[in-house]
Amino acid sequence: MKLEDFGYNDKLQKLRIENNLTDFEIGRVIAEHKERYIVKTENGEFEAEITGNLRFSAQSRVDFPAVGDWVVLTTYDSDSSVIHKILPRLSIITRQAVGQLGEIQIIATNIDYAFLIQAVDRDFNINRLERYLTICYSSKVEPIIVLTKTDLINEQKIAEITDSIKQRIKDILVFAISNETKDGYEALKDIIEKGKTYCMLGSSGVGKSTLLNNLSGRTLMKTDTISQSSNRGRHITSHRELIVLESGGILIDNPGMREVGIADTTGGLETTFDRIISISQKCKFKDCTHTNEIGCSVLEAVGKGEIEKNSYENYLKMEREKAHFESTIEERRKKDKEFGKVIKNYKKDMNKNKF
């Protein structure tokens, strides 16, 4: 297979030239297992590790390779390789790392489209969809909503759910499919473009692995039996992996996410809730929090039914979360800076004591 089959394009080639990396072999990270990577090149798949220099210079986990990354490497006959550098990323989907304040976790990189997957039986939640949308918009990735398990409800209920999404979330493609009957699959397949990279975002058990298997036409990911207590498939994907489909599209499966903490610093929240942001421009006070101020246009719009109350409350919740995340990052930077000064002064004192 050629590099273009894995998503390589003119933009990446330009970045490779600008960074003087043409003397190295190039490949794409297709799987990650605790800092051991599988890299796909034109010459095959190689197990890879990073150089000591790359490890030493990394400021955080974001500076390590992730699934979807294009890397330059040296390969050996034993199917092993060493990654020297990561090409600048065209896009990067992240979330707040679970249980680690101020830390970011990479979901996938160099993504063109994201399938936001929810099951219509029990998992469906528009508030969560808005979280996924915020992640996509802050990452400059185009979202596509995919509703699964439509065989478990009737057509009227499917129509109601679809309409509720379109009323609250504008200008986003919505597909309703059944992994069992394959209803809706042809329409979904028709939008998958050759050479473009897609990732799947959703909770455990919504049918991501089954969707991947069905789109590829072969069993690539294991799926477990249905849980009797929750009526959900027990999703057992434990790592991220990149798969090239027969259609030429490139799909990344991800473990299910119980928590979707936004790590938005680039306007994703504003894009998701663009109507609220637009109306807020008419507020009496520039620093209006849209909670209890007199002359708040947002509160007025909620009262008139122009903005859904649930969407408004979800916006406030995510805005608070974003502010907390940004303040936590600032605190970490301050502590790192203070620690750096301590180390610098310590080294100065050590050098003085040598003489």
Image (cartoon, rainbow, N blue to C red):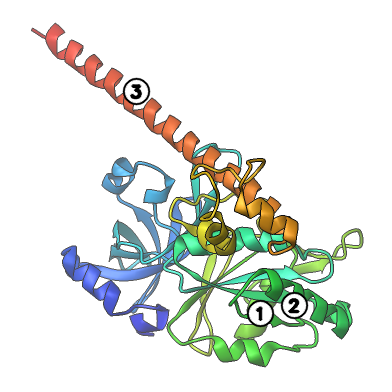
Q: Which mark is residue 1?
A: none
Tell me which residue sits at (19%, 11%) in the image: 349
Mark 1 nearby-residue class (10 Å; few <14, some 14–19, many ≥20): some
Tell me which residue sits at (52%, 90%) in the image: 247
Q: Quadrant of residue 92?
A: bottom left
- Tell me if label 1 and label 2 are in contact, CB under 8 Å: yes
Looking at the rendered image, the quarter that the C terminus falls into is: top left
Residue that carries the numbered disc 3 in the rendered image: 339
- How far from the left and from the top, in percent, is residue 146? 67, 76
Q: Nearer the viewer, residue 312 or 71?
A: 312
Tell me which residue sits at (58%, 43%) in the image: 289
- How far from the left and from the top, in percent, is residue 219? 66, 79
Residue that carries the numbered disc 2 in the rendered image: 162
Q: Is residue 102 above or below residue 163?
A: above
Q: How many marks?
A: 3
Find the residue positioned furthest to the right.
Answer: 228
Question: How far, Cα to Cα, is label 3 from label 1?
Answer: 49 Å
Tag 2 or tag 3, which sits nearer the N-term? 2
Asked which secondary structure carries label 2, the reply is helix
